[in-house]
Image (cartoon, rainbow, N blue to C red):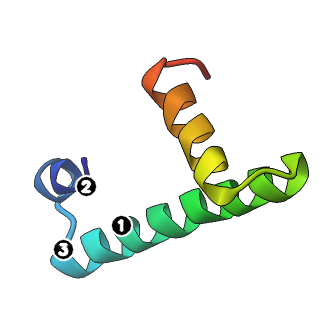
Amino acid sequence: MFLVGMETQGWTEERMENEVTEGIQKVLQQIFKLAATKGITTEAAARQIAEKRLSFDT
């Protein structure tokens, strides 16, 4: 997906790397927050987030 930004938006390699890094940070924050809020493991939280994304349920 980020390569698409590089190709279609004219991103530099540095911009693409920043977008990837920020995306990973955002997802990790969501995982840790969900785990803490629900009192579940980070693995369970990650699975819930992935399942929600894959079901296209927003």
What amino acid is labelled 3 in the image? Thr
Instruction: Using a 10 Å C-alpha cutoff, classify the residue at mark 2 as few (fewer than 14 neighbours), some (14 to 19) or many (20 or more).
Output: some
Left or right side of 19 for 36: right
Q: Percent x, y for residue 17?
A: 29, 75
Residue ID for mark 3: 12
The image quadrant that residue 20 belongs to is bottom left
| Residue located 71% across and 62% down the image | 32
Q: How many marks?
A: 3
**Mark whose residue sits in front, 3 or 2:** 2
- How many angstroms separate mark 3 from mark 2 (CA)? 11 Å
Residue under the point 84% across and 59% down: 36
Percent position of residue 56, x then y: 49, 19
Q: Are marks 2 and 1 in contact (CB under 8 Å)?
A: yes
Q: Which mark is residue 20?
A: 1
Of pointers 1 and 3, the one earlier in the residue sequence: 3
Marks 2 and 1, how far apart in space? 7 Å
Q: Amino acid at mark 2?
A: Phe
Q: Element at badge 2?
A: helix
Mark 2 or mark 1: whose residue is earlier in sequence: 2
Position of 33 with respect to 54 (left or right) is: right
Q: Which numbered disc, 1 or 3, marks the residue closer to the eye?
A: 1
Secondary structure, mark 3, is loop
Above or below, 55 against 29 in this view is above
Circle 2 is placed at which residue position? 2
| Residue closest to the eye, 12 or 31 | 31
Give the residue type at disc 1.
Val
Asked where in the image residue 12 lies, by quadrant, the reply is bottom left
